[in-house]
Image (cartoon, grey):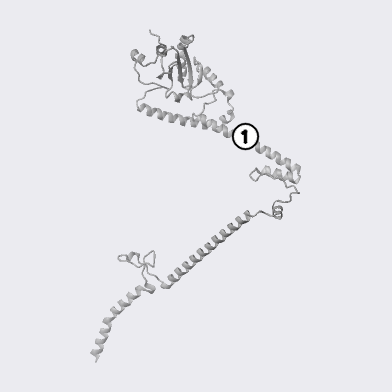
Amino acid sequence: MRSLRLLIITASLAALPAASSAQATNDEQKGFWQKGAATDWNTPAHGNSSNEIVYRDYPLTVDEIKLKVQKEAEEAVNSAQSAINAQSAETAATTDNKQKTPLTREQIIAKYGSPSQPLPIRAQKESPPEMQALFEALNSGDKELAWQYSIALAERNNRIKQVVSKATDYQLLAMEATGQRPSMELNPEADEMGATRLELRELIERTKMEQEKKKFEWDQALMKAGVAQEGDNWSTSRSTSSDKLASQIPVDPAGKVKLLIFFDERSPTIKDLSKSLKPLHDKFKGDPNVSILGLTMRSYATPGLKRIGEITSFPFPLVNGEALAPELRIQRYPSFVFLAVTSKQTYHIEGAQGAEEIVRVLNSMKGVKK
C-alpha cells in the first residue's frame, strides 16, 4: 500500500511541470503578462522580437479604459469644434444680412451722432501722436496745450527732415565708395555732404579698400588669362607693321576724324598721359577736320569736370565718359577710339600710346599719305 501511495505521488509530481507550463502560456496571453510591441501594446509580439517585448505590470483593463476615455475625449472635441464652426458660419451669414439691410434713421443717428451737432475733428489714427494730441487739445479749447503740441510737431518734422537728409547722404556716399557714382571730393565747393562724409570717412575708406581688393583680384585673374598690365594702364599685344596697321584703319571719305580718349582720371600716371598728349594738341589745334575729346572714367557735374581738367592738366576738352564707355566696349584705360565722322566707322587702340602712333592713325583716317 505504501508503495502504491508513493507511486501516485510521484506521478502527480511528474505531471506538475506540464500543468505549470500550460498555465504560464495562458497567463502570457492575458492579465499581467500580456505581450506587445514596444511602441504599441495592442500590436502582438512577432518572431525574434524579444528585445521589443514589453511586460505590463498592471492589468490589461487599465490600458483599455485609457484608450476608451481618450477616444471619447477626441470625439467630444471634434463635436464641439463642428458646433463652433457651424455657429461661426451662422454668425457670418447673419452679419452679412445685417449689412445688406439699410440702417434706420434712429440707427444712423445713434451710430454717427445727430447732424445738428458738429462732430469734433480728429487726426487720423495713423498720424503721429503729436498730431493726434494737437487735434484733441484744439477740440477741448486748450490753446496753450495745443500750442505746445504744435511746437512738438514742428520739432518732429524737423527731425524727420534731418534723418531723411542723412539717409540720403549715406546712400550717395555708399554709391561713391562702391564706384557707382562719381566722388565730389574733387570739387569741395559743390560737396553738400561734407559733414556726413567726414563722419563716415573711416567706413568709406574701408569700403574703397575692399573694392580695390576685388579689382586687384580681377586684375590678377586677367593676368593669368594672358593679358599684360602696366601699372594702371592696360596693353595688349599688337602688330607694329605699318602696312598691316594701315590695312585695318578705315578712311573717312571727307577726311573728318574725331578722337575720343577714354582715361582714368584717378590713375597715378594721369600726369604722364596728359604730357604725352600735348604734342597732339599742338599739331591738330588748327585742323578743322580733327576734333579730340577726353572722356573720364566716371561722371561729374560741370564744376567737377573743370576741376579734373585743372588737376590733371589734360590738354583737350573733357566730357563724362561713363555712359558712353559700355556702348563703345571700353574695357581698359586709357583707350583711344577713332571715329570716321562721315562713314561712322571706328578704330580702337587700347593702352598708353605715343603721340607719333596717334598721329599716324589720324592721318591714315584722313587719307593723308606720307
Is 189 on the left or on the right of 333, as rendered?
A: right
**Mark 1: amino acid:** Gln
Image quadrant where residue 166 sits: top right
Residue that lies at the very extreme toward the top in this rendered image: 370
- Residue 301 point in image, percent of width and height: 55, 23
Q: Nearer the viewer, residue 227 or 350?
A: 350
- Residue 352 point in image, percent of width and height: 41, 18
Q: Residue at x 48, y 14 (%)?
A: 291
Q: Is residue 280 above or below residue 143?
A: above
Image quadrant where residue 15 sits: bottom left
Q: Element at badge 1?
A: helix
Image quadrant where residue 164 sits: top right
Residue that lies at the very extreme toward the left in this rendered image: 3
Within-10-Å neighbours for mark 1: few <14, some 14–19, many 20+: few
Q: Is residue 168 above or below residue 128?
A: above
- Residue 35 point in image, percent of width and height: 36, 69
Viewer can see residue 268 = no
- Residue 364 point in image, percent of width and height: 39, 12
Q: Is residue 312 above or below residue 152?
A: above
Viewer can see residue 100 = yes
Q: Nearer the viewer, residue 290 or 305?
A: 290
Is 111 on the left or on the right of 229, as rendered?
A: right
Residue indicated by mark 1: 162
